[in-house]
Image: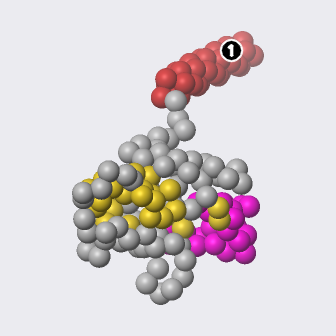
Amino acid sequence: MPDGRIAYTRDGAFKLDANGNLVTSDGYKLIPNITLPADTVQVSIGTDGTVSILEAGQTQMQQIGQIQLANFINPAGLHSLGSNLYINTSASGDPIVDNPGNSGLGSLRQGFVEMSNVQLVDEMTDLITGQRAYDAASKAIVTSDQMLQTVNNLKR
């Protein structure tokens, strides 16, 4: 962060700034900083977080950096700064930083967009089931009300 604090993000849409640094979509540098040479023609990020490049005139990719992931004992305890940025608190615990695939951390996928954990077909089925249960309960209440009204009319 500009004020020197370290913030964490789930935003994996990296881009290059004017100096060739790999930054988040909001322009914040990664830690450790990864700078691409000006003559880079191809960038590859491995599932283990290794950043490799192919420079103009070269035939072999060379590794220039490593993207690391952080995990927290209590991710719900992170403090949200907005714009998909979080800082650790005493409730979240200290970050456990390691390379992707180690220490139970996930892996990275270049060119993929993370999808939600929602299965649309299942959710629609559950919605229809809930709606039918509501309709049945509503009809039961109406029938019960009509029966009580009939009982009250018999007393008169």
129 to 114, vertically: above or below: above
145 to 71, vertically: above or below: above
73 to 90, vertically: above or below: above
Taking 26 as reference, is 138 left or right?
Answer: right
For image coordinates 39% across by 53% down, the residue present is 61
Magenta residues, start to end: 69-96
For image coordinates 50% across by 56% down, the residue present is 50
Give the position of the C terminus as an image quadrant: top right
Q: Residue 138, how many percent across, how many down?
A: 59, 22
For the residue marked with disc 1, what is the amino acid? Answer: Met
Taking 23 as reference, is 155 left or right?
Answer: right
Q: Which residue is mark 1?
A: 147
Q: Residue 151, how many percent across, how many down?
A: 72, 15
Is residue 30 a member of the stretch shown in magenta?
A: no
> Among all residues in the image, which is located at the extreme bottom?
3
The image's colour scheme reads: secondary structure
Q: Which sits in the foreground, 122 or 92?
A: 92
Is residue 74 a member of the stretch shown in magenta?
A: yes
Task: Note whether residue 41 is visible.
Answer: yes
Q: Residue 98, how many percent across, how many down?
A: 65, 61
Q: Which sits in the foreground, 27 or 17?
A: 17
Q: Which sits in the foreground, 109 or 135?
A: 109
Taking 28 as reference, is 94 left or right?
Answer: right
**Neighbours of disc 1 within 10 Å: few (<14), some (14-19), many (20+):** few
Q: Residue 131, how many percent across, how many down?
A: 54, 24
Taking 99 as reference, is 42 left or right?
Answer: left
- Which type of secondary structure does the marked residue at label 1 adopt? helix
Which quadrant of the figure has residue 35?
bottom left
